[in-house]
Image: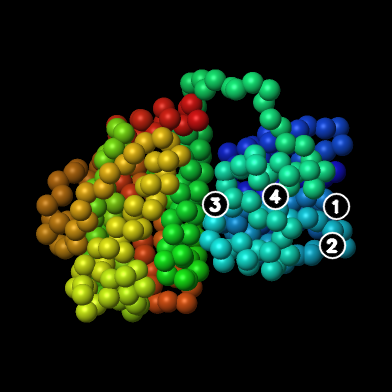
Amino acid sequence: MKILICDDSAVARKSIARSICQSAQHTICFAQDGREALSIISEQNIDILFLDLTMPVMDGFEVLAALPVSHYATKVIVVSGDIQKEARNRCLSLGAYDFVEKPFSSKVIEPLFEKLGLTLYLPQHTVKKVHTKLSQQECLAKFKELTNIALGKGAAIMADHLNEFIHLPVPNVGPLSFGELKMAMLDVLQRDGSIAVTQRFVGGGLHGEALVCLRGQDIEEIGRRLGYPREYSTYNEIVLNISNLLVSSYLVSLGGQIDKEISLRQPEVMDMSSLKNTSTPDGETMFTIEYTYQAERLDFECEVLFLLDKKSVDLIQSIMEIL
């Protein structure tokens, strides 16, 4: 049996591979994006494809739409952090055999593996968590995978509230110089039709700030669907409530994964004075998580940028080494 695991995250690829009991009858290969997966499927007879949805180059939806690329019947199991009901429905309508939420739940995956002719690997004894020294790049990769899962849960919350499909992004995770940050903030504040919100968060040794930029003609419509109609709320109050939901949904999911309870301060609308009052040297870098949510049928786009200080980054690295 030939198995292909397609995910842009090396952490996710290894996790899926480790969950399959090794057998001389199984051959496992890997792809980092949808285009590479299609190339492999067109050249080899792949029995089972484990497919991520949110990937660069070609995402999972595009792969499903492009299949079949040969006469060989490949069972496609979508494994994704995007847990919106509409995402699942679209995958199944495009021919996916099944849809599984990240991270794996043994209760869900074991019966599926049985149907596929696979055996789920279950350690005989509880494995004690040990501190394993990882490189900065390895920690970054693990944290990015947690971020993908948190974004998926956040998008699902927004989709349920809005009855709207949210396009899930590939997040950018890594350092950003303060000079670059100031330029990005200045661009947001000077852009017509945009409004920016800042919100600090703290908890479990983590300290940081979220910057949210909202734009589009349907911000008030989104406020109405969330229960903040214009007749009872000012435009700024609607914006603050939308921003708070976006930030809190991500942080609650992330905190649950790393066993940290994170509290949010009150959000505030940003203006030029907020930027002028910042005094961090331009040469200093900050650790950032950046992504953009887009509603499919509404004129609405939201850019979110999380900033973490050095102590928080050191704490995250230590957590990644024992997860």
User: Which of the two discs, 3 and 2, labels the residue nearer the N terminus?
Assistant: 2
Give, as a three-letter code, the residue at label 3.
Gly
Question: Which disc, if any, is residue 13?
Answer: none
**Quadrant location of the N terminus?**
top right
Mark 4–mark 3 Cα distance, whole angstroms, equals 13 Å
Q: Assign a secondary structure to mark 3.
A: loop
Name the residue rendered at 17%, 56% in the picture.
Answer: 275
Tag 1 residue = 45
Tag 3 residue = 81
State whether residue 270 appears in this view.
Answer: yes
CB atoms of marks 2 and 1 within 8 Å:
yes
Give, as a three-letter code, the residue at label 1.
Asn
User: Which of the two discs, 2 and 4, labels the residue nearer the N terminus?
Assistant: 4
- Tell me residue 285's x, y (percent): 30, 42
Q: Is residue 294 left or right of residue 214?
A: right
Which callout, 3 or 2, points to the residue nearer the camera?
Answer: 3
Q: Label 3 crowding class (10 Å Cα cut-off): few <14, some 14-19, many 20+?
A: many
User: Which of the two discs, 4 and 3, labels the residue nearer the N terminus?
Assistant: 4
Name the residue rendered at 74%, 51% in the picture.
Answer: 49
Mark 2–mark 4 Cα distance, whole angstroms, equals 17 Å
- Tell me residue 89's x, y (percent): 63, 66
Question: Which disc, if any, is residue 70?
Answer: 2
Q: Assign a secondary structure to mark 4.
A: strand
Question: Which disc, if any, is residue 50?
Answer: 4
Which callout, 1 or 4, points to the residue nearer the camera?
Answer: 4
Q: Label 1 crowding class (10 Å Cα cut-off): few <14, some 14-19, many 20+?
A: some
